[in-house]
Image (cartoon, rainbow, N blue to C red):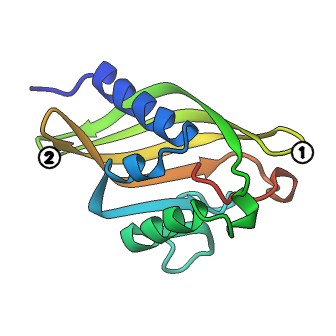
Amino acid sequence: MPVTRQQVEDFLYAEAGLLDAWKLDEWLTLLTDDAVYRVPSNDKPASDPKDTLFTIADDINRIRARVTRLKKTTAHAEFPRSRTRRLITNVRILEENAQTVKIEANFIVYRFRRNESVYQFVGQYRYELRVADASFKIASRVAIIDAMELGSLASVSFIL
């Protein structure tokens, strides 16, 4: 049975809700055991981390380590943690078969931190989802940030 955009949107909205609520352990359960999470440099968004500098290029072990670190009080960039609000839009199914679904979606992540300015991260997600039971698991999550200059956006210590 074909995957519907509504099913994909529901999954993405649930994921965004977990991240905004800082339910990082629950978010980890959405990932496959070989998942990758990437934030490429904004000048080469279609590149490969093997030969290009990435802002983030994590495999599942680094993702788990990132979550563990972010939950500690010694993670000064996120203690107290940022508050975020994610808006997901323009969800499109690009390709699907019985095992995987490739999708794109636009995002805005608002980050609120202490008395700092509100930061806005705008861009596009590219996912490869694996069909799992009645839902999905994230095999690949790429967040491509539209801003050409990242210095004014502060730290990307949280999960986009």
Left or right: 151, with 3 as reference point: right
Q: Secondary structure at mark 2?
A: loop
Residue, far front: 73
Query: Quarter-wise, where is residue 42 in the image?
Result: bottom right
| Vertical arrangement, residue 118 with respect to residue 156, above or below | above
Front in this rendered view, residue 153 or 103: 153
| Vertical arrangement, residue 71 with respect to residue 92, above or below | below
Q: Is residue 47 visible?
A: no
Residue 70's label in the rendered image is none
Q: Secondary structure at mark 1?
A: loop
Residue, far bottom: 51
Q: Please name the residue that numbered disc 2 is placed on.
A: 99
- Give the residue drawn at x 32%, y 19%: 6
Image spot of residue 9 (x, y percent): 38, 25
Q: CA distance from mark 2 to mark 1?
A: 43 Å
Q: Is residue 86 visible?
A: yes
- Give the residue drawn at x 14%, y 46%: 99
- Give the residue drawn at x 63%, y 54%: 158
Front in this rendered view, residue 137 or 115: 115
Residue 116's label in the rendered image is 1
Residue, far top: 6
Image spot of residue 35 (x, y percent): 34, 61
Neighbor class of circle 2 (other Cα within 10 Å; few <14, some 14-19, many 20+) is few
